[in-house]
Amino acid sequence: QVQVVESGGGLVQPGGSLRLSCAASGSIFSVYGMHWFRQVPGKQRELVASITRSGTTNYADSVKGRFTISRDNAKNTVYLQMNSLKPEDTAVYYCNAAIRSGIALNTYDYWGQGTQVTVSS
C-alpha cells in the first residue's frame, strides 16, 4: 500500500511565500519522476513543475523564476517553494509521483489528495 500526502497549503498575501511538501510512504522500492499540478474550478489540471530522480527540473512558464521544485530521495519527499505569489496562483495543488512498489515491483502513478493555496489580500 502506497500513500502520497501533501501539506503546506494555506492563505497568503500577494507577494508572499509558501512551501508545499509531498511525502510518499508504504512498501516503496523507488520513486521516479515527481510532479506538482494545480487545478482551479472549471479548468483542466495543469502541470506546474517536475523533477526527475536525478534532480533535473522543468517548470511551467507561468511560474519560472518564482517557484522551485526539489526532492529528498531518502525521505521520498518532494517540495515546492513558491515565492512572489500572485492571485492567479490560487488553486488546489496536487502531488503526483511514479512509484515502484510491492512484491511485484510494478510502477504506477500516485496522486495526493490536494492542498488548497489561496493568494489574496
Image (cartoon, rainbow, N blue to C red):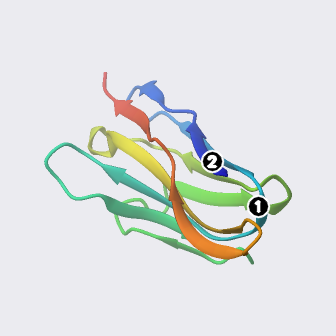
Identify the residue shown where x is 75% and y is 56%.
Answer: 76
Residue 104 location, x and y as percent?
72, 75
Q: Which mark is residue 104?
A: none
Residue at image location 86% in from the left, 58% down from the top: 74
Q: Secondary structure at mark 2?
A: strand
Residue bearing the label numbered 1: 28
What is the x, y in percent for residue 48? Answer: 42, 61
Q: Residue under label 2, please give it.
A: 3
Above or below, 99 relative to 15: below
The answer to which quarter of the image holds residue 61 is bottom left
**Left or right of residue 110, residue 12 in this image:** left
Q: Is residue 8 above or below residue 47?
A: above
Question: Which circle's residue, 2 or 1, is located before the other in the chain?
Answer: 2
Residue 52 appearing in the image: no
**Residue 14: % across, % down:** 37, 32
Q: Amino acid at mark 2?
A: Gln
Q: Amino acid at mark 1?
A: Ile
